Image: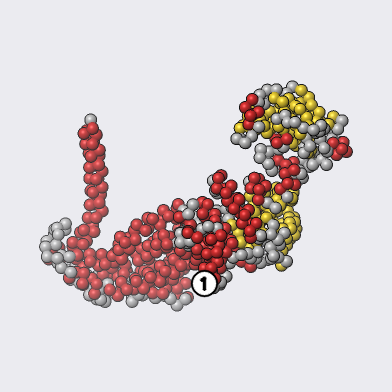
Amino acid sequence: MNINKIFHINLGRTLIYLVLISFAIIYLAPLYVMFSTSLKDIEEIRSGNLLALPNDPTLYAWGKAWSSACTGSECNGLAPFFWNSVKIVFPAVIISTIVGAFNGYVLSKWKFKGSELLFGALLFGCFIPFQVILLPMAILLSKLGLSNTVSGLVLVHVIYGVAFTTLFFRNYYVGIPTELVRAARLDGAGFIDIFRHIFLPLSTPIIVVTLIWQFTQIWNDFLFGVVYSGSGTQPITVALNNLVNTSIGGKEYNVDMAAAIIAALPTLIVYVFAGKYFVRGLTAGAVKG
Amino acid sequence: MGHIQLKNVCKSFGSTEVLKDIDLDIQDGELLILIGPSGCGKSTLMNLIAGLEDITSGQIVVAGSDVSDKSPKDRDIAMVFQSYALYPTMNVARNISFGLEMRKVPKDEQDETVNKVAELLQIDHLLDRKPGQLSGGQRQRVAMGRALARSPKAFLFDEPLSNLDAKLRVEMRTEIKKLHQRLGTTIVYVTHDQVEAMTLANRIAVLKDGIIQQLGTPYEIYNDPANHFVADFMGSPGMNFVECIVFEDKLVIHSGSQNYQLSVPCSDAINRSGLDSVLLGIRPEMLTDLKPHENNPYIHEVIFDVEVIEPMGGDTIAIGKWNDTEVQARLSPESGEIADKGFKLQVDTSKAIVFDPLTGQRVR
């Protein structure tokens, strides 16, 4: 009886693990194929063993993808575009997070007449499809003289991101007791002091969530990148598309794969290292300040 | 120094009038309790004094200067919140010194004050801890420490003990009273606990529907309430109210299948009022076991059918009926054990008061 019971549990467990492992394999298989293909030379790829490990691993494809593959007429690899993306992502993420934090602080703790309406309107911004704002934004950018520039793309991402960052911070700050603000006001602290000394030190989890969210969104963006960038200011997603679509001679699958991994790597790294803070931050906001 | 005057203070939120024409003169060094049921406006009144909310009309004067339009930080008033509102990321020392830091007090002076306050409140061993690592009573002390550190003109306490357990509440209550006696600073203290009010106050202001019903010493409030509401609100167990028919200058009660005529001190006033029936108010401690007494016109012997007894330890509450209204008597524990139908009760009406049953106003 007892032995049976243990056996029973083990059988159940085994089944669960089998299912989990098989799903994991299905999800990880493309990554594996990309990675192993990127380490093969073109001869080996042509021989057709998609799933086989590389016989003779080489970093040739990675080197080419990074510095000499052709993206359209230029053949400098992904490197310049990678740095374009970095130049877009960092300011855009930081500015939108700061603006969002301030917005959230005001909308949760310094309510004014119409602040709820403003918040509702901001929320609406989360649900506007990208395509709808393409044309008006293009006109705005040209009026500001920012067409085809990195600054222009930063501006677009900040505007589009503020809706989300405000939502994050506002909902997090709503959970922090308003009496803290009252106590601090009596202690003589002003608007900025209260934010700096009381709210900011409490905000680590939600800052991490916002940074990860914004980083991923902006790094992975293709539509804004392709519409609002010029020839020298394209982000890496656009360059990856160009690289894959440019073939001189035969198609170099290994270079394509390496390029795709390079383009995806930063977000992957962010998730691996900060993923647990992401989950923790999301739940921290939900429970208590 | 800590003289606070409220002159015709009104406050409305939209079309709801929360406070109506409040006039209050809080003396320097006084401990004034604001008490009332929830929603009576007592916390709002406190927020107005602190400057956390703006008055709709009227004037607030602190230490001789009109602060009605000043921001909280310029009023030099400290507040202890119900939830303590300690800054969660700062340790105890910084929680206490934050107000000084914001007022640009030199660092060594801050440290000195923190140590002094911590010693006074016996929290000097906790200075490095975060509020999350403290017990309820310790947080309470830190919250008071934060208020003390600035040595303000006045303290506001907003139901500071309501989050503590019963035993700790009594301890902290005594401690607050000692602290007040020692510092002599003006304190305005909001509570809905009438025991807290009675024990702590120099004066009590009873609030209802945004109006001060009565302002007086605990003795006055308890023994000479202005109206039915105040009489009912203060005291535990509460005052007995029985509607009685007036016969000549006496009040008729029906108890234990017999009628009694009770004489009360305010019989002249009853006659003058011309009321046929009045509401008699008499505290449970005036309904007792038989005790030896001088020949006193206000002492009556009444048969009482005890229906329920509630032993409280020190005494026993016996519940029965007069004129079909529930009445509580305060018996000795020994009598409580034997109290039953036909129990002989001594009723002392020398402190009994009488209300107009319709308006709830005192007849006097």
Going by the numbered disc 1, the residue's amino acid type is Lys
Q: Is residue A62 left or right of residue B272?
A: left
Q: Residue furthest right?
A: B272
In front here: B237 or B8? B237
Q: Residue at x 22, y 52 (%)?
A: A25
Residue B65 on image: x %, y %? 71, 67
Question: What colour scheme does the image use?
Answer: secondary structure
Residue A129 appears in the figure? no
User: Which one is in front, A140 or A212?
Assistant: A212
From the viewer's perspective, is residue A238 above or below residue B225?
A: below
Q: Characterize the local packing of mark 1: few (<14), some (14-19) or many (20 or more) Cα atoms within 10 angstroms.
A: few
Residue B255 lies in quadrant: top right
Q: Eyeballing the image, is B14 above or below A229?
A: above
Disc 1: which residue? B107
Q: Position of residue B205 (x, y in %)?
A: 71, 51
Question: Residue B309 sits in which quadrant?
Answer: top right
A250 and B258: which one is in front?
Answer: B258
| Front one among A12 and B103 | B103
Residue at 65%, 28% in the rendered image? B335
Query: What is the chain identity of the residue bearing mark 1?
Result: B
- Which residue is pictured at 40% across the width and 67% down the height? A93
Q: Residue at 51%, 54% (x, y): give it.
A: B138
